[in-house]
Image (tube, rainbow, N blue to C red):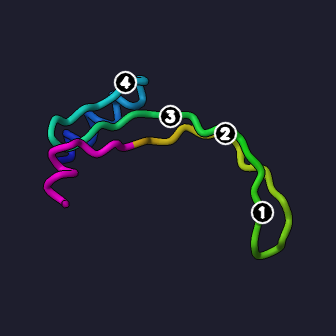
Amino acid sequence: MNSIIETIQKELQNGGDVVIPGFGALSVATRSARQARNFQTGKMMQIPAAKVVKFKVGKTLKDAVK
């Protein structure tokens, strides 16, 4: 399992997508910078742009969960 996770991490770090048939697809997306409110203090704060991992569930898994 560890080697599978390492392979997925390396592929995503290199900008590639990982597709596991019947399970889903992993990809890297860029989330742009935005402003948000800190609800504890009420002050506005800047959230910087970031790269995030997106997962899209595959049809086989989606149908199995229904």
Tell me the quarter of the picture where residue 12 sits: top left
- Left or right position of 9 against 65: right
Q: Image point 34% across, 30% down: which residue?
A: 10
| Above-or-below relation of 46 to 22 | below
Tell me which numbered mark, 3 or 1, is placed earlier along the sequence.
3
Q: Which residue is mark 1?
A: 37
Q: Image point 20% across, 43% down: which residue?
A: 59
Q: Which residue is mark 4?
A: 16
Percent of width and height locating residue 48? 71, 43
Q: Nearer the viewer, residue 7 or 38?
A: 38
Q: Secondary structure at mark 3?
A: strand
Q: Amino acid at mark 2?
A: Ala
Which residues are drawn in magenta? 55-66
Q: Secondary structure at mark 4?
A: loop
Percent of width and height locating residue 32? 66, 37
Q: Secondary structure at mark 2?
A: loop
Q: Image point 76% across, 76% down: which residue?
A: 40
Tell me which numbered mark, 1 or 2, is placed earlier along the sequence.
1
Q: Nearer the viewer, residue 30 or 4?
A: 30
Asked whether disc 1 touches disc 2, contact meaning CB atoms under 8 Å apart, the reply is no
- Left or right position of 47 against 56: right
Tell me which numbered mark, 2 or 4, is placed earlier along the sequence.
4
The label on residue 29 is: 3
Q: Nearer the viewer, mark 1 or mark 4?
A: 1
Percent of width and height locating residue 35? 77, 51
> Hey, which residue is sitting farthest right in the picture?
43
